[in-house]
Image (cartoon, coloured by chain):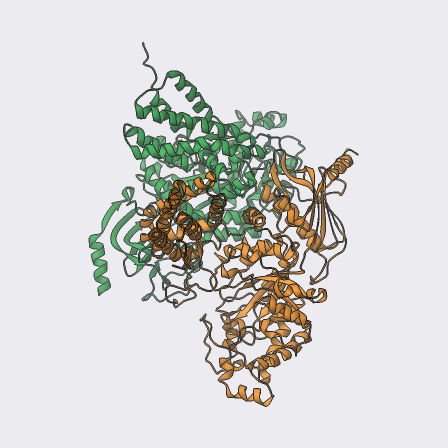
Chain colours: A green, B orange
Amino acid sequence: MRTLLLVVSALFLSTCFAASQMPSTLTLMPVPAKIELGTGQLVIDQLFTVSVTGAKDARLDSGIPRFLDQLSRQTGMPLNKQPADSAKATLVIRCENAGRKVQELGEDESYTLELTPARATLTARTPLGVLHGLQTFLQLVEPAPAGFAVPVLSIHDEPRFAWRGLLIDVCRHFIPLDVMKRNLDGMAAMKMNVLHWHLSDDEGFRVESKKLPKLHELGSQGQYYTQAEIREFIGYARDRGIRVVPELEMPGHSRSIVVGYPELASQPGPYPPGRVARDATALDVTQEKTYKFLDKLIGEMASLFPDAYLHIGGDEVDDKPWNSNPKIQEFIHAHGMKDNRDLQAYFNKRLENIVSKHGKVMMGWDEVLHPDLPKTVVVQSWRGQESLAAAAKQGYRGLLSNGYYLDLMWPAARHYAVDPMSGAAATLTPDEAKRILGGEACMWAEYITPETIDSRIWPRLAAIAERFWSPQDVKDPKSMYQRLDEVSWRLGWLGLTHESNYVPMLRRLAGTEDIRTLRVLADAVEPTKDYTRTEVYPQPPVQSVPLHRLVDAARPESAVARRFAELVGNYIESGYKDSAAEAQIRAWLVKWQGNHPTLKPLLESSFLLAEDQPLSEDLATLSTAGLQALDSIGKNQPLPEAWRSEQLAVAERSMQPRANLLIMVAPSIQKLVEAASPPPATHP
Amino acid sequence: MRTLLLVVSALFLSTCFAASQMPSTLTLMPVPAKIELGTGQLVIDQLFTVSVTGAKDARLDSGIPRFLDQLSRQTGMPLNKQPADSAKATLVIRCENAGRKVQELGEDESYTLELTPARATLTARTPLGVLHGLQTFLQLVEPAPAGFAVPVLSIHDEPRFAWRGLLIDVCRHFIPLDVMKRNLDGMAAMKMNVLHWHLSDDEGFRVESKKLPKLHELGSQGQYYTQAEIREFIGYARDRGIRVVPELEMPGHSRSIVVGYPELASQPGPYPPGRVARDATALDVTQEKTYKFLDKLIGEMASLFPDAYLHIGGDEVDDKPWNSNPKIQEFIHAHGMKDNRDLQAYFNKRLENIVSKHGKVMMGWDEVLHPDLPKTVVVQSWRGQESLAAAAKQGYRGLLSNGYYLDLMWPAARHYAVDPMSGAAATLTPDEAKRILGGEACMWAEYITPETIDSRIWPRLAAIAERFWSPQDVKDPKSMYQRLDEVSWRLGWLGLTHESNYVPMLRRLAGTEDIRTLRVLADAVEPTKDYTRTEVYPQPPVQSVPLHRLVDAARPESAVARRFAELVGNYIESGYKDSAAEAQIRAWLVKWQGNHPTLKPLLESSFLLAEDQPLSEDLATLSTAGLQALDSIGKNQPLPEAWRSEQLAVAERSMQPRANLLIMVAPSIQKLVEAASPPPATHP
């Protein structure tokens, strides 16, 4: 009875928040659809137990102990993993239905979580909803004066989009399964539900084929997953509510196929094994044996991968091998096709027959779109909302990936601002809009290794995950960053190394324990953006280029630069009156100014760091300018134009890639310089 | 020919160092027996290859790819793992003999490493020497202006002691095999060669027994290693040159045995399963069925563990169960024994018969020593060199563990100063001295978990490893610490978490990302020493006490306190003239003084941190006193005695355990206080 009163009073006092106004004390990510906040807490101590009622599902049998392990890791408390009686359990779970044998697109993922001072109740229609609700619960646990606790509240949650994916390219650099798995754990924590596994490309064919063994034997440099490993991995993903959609690239990006089967190529080759730079390869789609081969391959892969969707790539087909093969050009002519584009459409149509014959829905990148293809085909857009909307208008379902390329090294906020339903997609009719299934972030692997991949995916992917899950009006970047900072380190409990590998990589560069000055520089820079990275030394004869320089250790988004920009913004907005901001800005500038002399000997001592000297020097120079600017603003004595243009030149240079890095605090210092020395009035 | 000239000139220029004067530019640990340093470097790039000639051994087949993996991790460079031709390889290995089928005590472990600008040559009599030499090579690789490189030098190395062990207790807290394995990797890096596996104790019996299944079924709370796992683990250790010596405790520390087999106990029980506080249990050694049981158990374990040695514990037998059992007292009387001590000797003699019948050499702790036992028995001394020397004089071989207990939370230098051949052992004749086989560090597990164990073992164990391996005159703590700081982070490449778990544990305590102020406090404290730790809340009903407080996150030895003590030492020794030291001391004191007000709200917000408030407050108070002292010294104006005694009281309190922690910078601040206010002259 006392319990009931507490519940009622808690609900009475509760406040209902639109998701976009979630209270800042909660670090939920993605933000749930609806929250009602009460008062008080449910204490989580070592007596914590869980009960489950309702439908049986193997994912609950494994998911609940995994949840308890995670809670134990997060709190440092050993917990009892025996299931408890519903009447006594702290967390009572009710799962209404068992899930589908193979997880399906659009299965119900909603859940309701009710937390009172006495107990927690999690209800869901499917095991998927239960898994999502458990992740929400874990995010709510925090140390409090009375012990670990979750706040009294009520959440009803469901995803905005049914397809919330991450593509991982394992061709350019092979990614071992343990690394893949910890990333699945991260995805599950962020309620993502599709791993798009980019398994074949010019650089490697990464799946064992028992029917066409030269694919992995000759096309993988020995780096591939066995079928047994793949089955186990798919089970691991399923346990976490994640579908695995394989991608096998064709007819372009197919060098690794023709290494073993050169008779399928449009040019005679040779195609020697070994990892090489991407070169022009395309399957000869005019010969029947190519289709026999693909029928065999897709038949085998369709039974290995249970998911209903199979991605055939289809992007960036290089014309050269087709153009320079007279037989192919003759075929185009003989069949009344206009060009290579028509030839690819012909190929896709035949391919779609094969894919659907083996019971799968075909997916492809933008380029596959052609009126000849059936409307079941799903289009993944690397080109943008316009392309996506065009497909939806023609009746095709689609996914957005443009704007979510993690390898471009954009800040989280830039990805976060991209909405699958914006731009041209915003003009769709409701029926057309339904065809936008969601989106996928893409982790292309030219410049990642098992050591660095986590830092390229996390924490930025969490912001994209929120875009795919949360209501459209959840879009305040400030709130996002506040929560992202907290989510990031918590992801470390899953074994993700995006934070923990930073210091070891800096120490490798320095060859010593004391990296204080190197870290000051590393914290202030970011890898160059988009596709501007260049390698500074020639391709070595074995394996790949080592990725062990400052650009590889540096984070895609510098938290220091972001916070510094905020300080400078506040200072300027206050009309230079915010003296607390001014003091902090000054402290940073003093630190950066003094860093170079101490760091210089270290930079000179290591071949890996020598290239970073100009950056360190310019950071010091810029900081001196910033300090002069602060003094000038403080005294209200504008600095001369000559000074201004000199400093702006340094700032300009600092924002250009050197050693593939940008000094990310430069734009903020530039603002101070401009404030201290306003441009002369222009006379028309 | 050019190569040869280079080699000759390098040797010509070389300098020969006694091991105790190893140049400080090298971070070798343990210090090798002999080094000759040349000039120049051998560059390690992606063309690096290894060749092996001589004897075949599976440990080389696995050890060399593992070495290459490690080199690859350490440099961030993908390397070719194909073995190379001797004429072309960068590193040419020659192994003269294959090793013994089961690694033996005293097998040759020496090696010679010659590094020239053109190539590296590693020669050893056995695979063990090769493995050690590879570890030395890895420690020499550093980034240099021309690339990663090793210096030109020549090392001849061999261990001082044949037995260089680490005991890990897996009874008080169970330690999973992955954690055990990464610690084996750390041991191998430090050239240690014995894992002493403390597998049974009151709190748990951790080995599967197929013949006596109630041992693990009822005595382990479900936490034990299967025999298949143990075999695999022993193979893992063997691959790294490490013997595995099992310990099964008897006749005391045996509660986990009598849980399943109460008929063996001296008192009727009951002995319910479940982890409990240690209570008085001793096997009834007067009854024949006890020996039948032990024959069965030891027979099974002798075939599971291939090592020639089997440790039967034998320490701290609690008299109570024997005293209060009239049948046992009657037995003592009837057999003309004086006391329980004689009874234990009787037991040990019969036990030794069983152990040697099954082909093993018996080991035990000090207490087993008794003239009735054969001289083959090996005594492990937790009591000290006196006890060890006494045993050696009587003809017994022995190991020192006293002084190497890692759970006592001593600084590395204190362990480092303990020498197995010092004290009474220094007076032994050469023949007696040979009986001192070496030593073993001990990691008792009352207050460790898989999360914290690495931080309790590393890096301090590396200093002990050096004591066991390097020549006796290698004993300068300053050089040891200089190298230890570097070795510590490099051990992280093996997956050891002693450094990487620190920040996550602090964040758990704080419940937030920003732990800057908490870290300032955590860096300045250490866990209480020796056996003074007390728990602050009652034993929970399930499993064990959570080990997630500041005392668990804090390092056994604070590097900040050590460096601060050095600064204060330098300052005082300089007659207060070292102004650089003064400035650094001041900076620390200012930081500590200002930390408390910022940290306070965080300490109040978490039940885990509330107990640390007095520490944070006293750190600030002490720092204020330290700053006052600096000012007074600077002005040469001594402070009054009242001030002095007030500050000394705070310092005194700071060195007493609170929340199981000590403020480790307090003694150094105390020195400043004393310097600023000299005690009044005493009038006799």
The image shows residue B423, relative to residue A319, as above or below, that is: below
Q: Is residue B588 left or right of residue A314?
A: left
> How many numbered marks appear?
0
Residue at image position (57%, 53%) is A228
Q: Name the quadrant containing residue B183.
A: bottom right
Residue A79 at x, y percent in the picture: 41, 62
Considering the image in quadrants, where does the C terminus of chain B appear?
A: bottom left
Q: Residue furthest toward the right? A: B1
Q: Nearer the viewer, residue A451 or B527?
A: B527
Residue B435 at x, y percent in the picture: 68, 66
Considering the image in quadrants, where does the N terminus of chain B appear?
A: top right
Q: Nearer the viewer, residue A212 or A412?
A: A412
Q: Residue furthest toward the front? A: B684
Residue B135 at x, y percent in the picture: 64, 49
Residue at image position (34%, 50%) is B640
The image shows residue B89, relative to residue B262, as above or below, that is: above
Res A394 seen here: no
Q: Nearer the viewer, residue B348 or B431?
A: B431
Q: Residue furthest toward the top? A: A684
Q: Nearer the viewer, residue A75 or B476?
A: B476
Q: Is residue A164 left or right of residue A253?
A: left
Res A167 seen here: yes
Residue A512 at x, y percent in the picture: 55, 42
Q: Is residue A410 left or right of residue A659?
A: left
Q: Is residue A515 left or right of residue B360?
A: left
Q: Name the quadrant containing residue A162.
A: top left
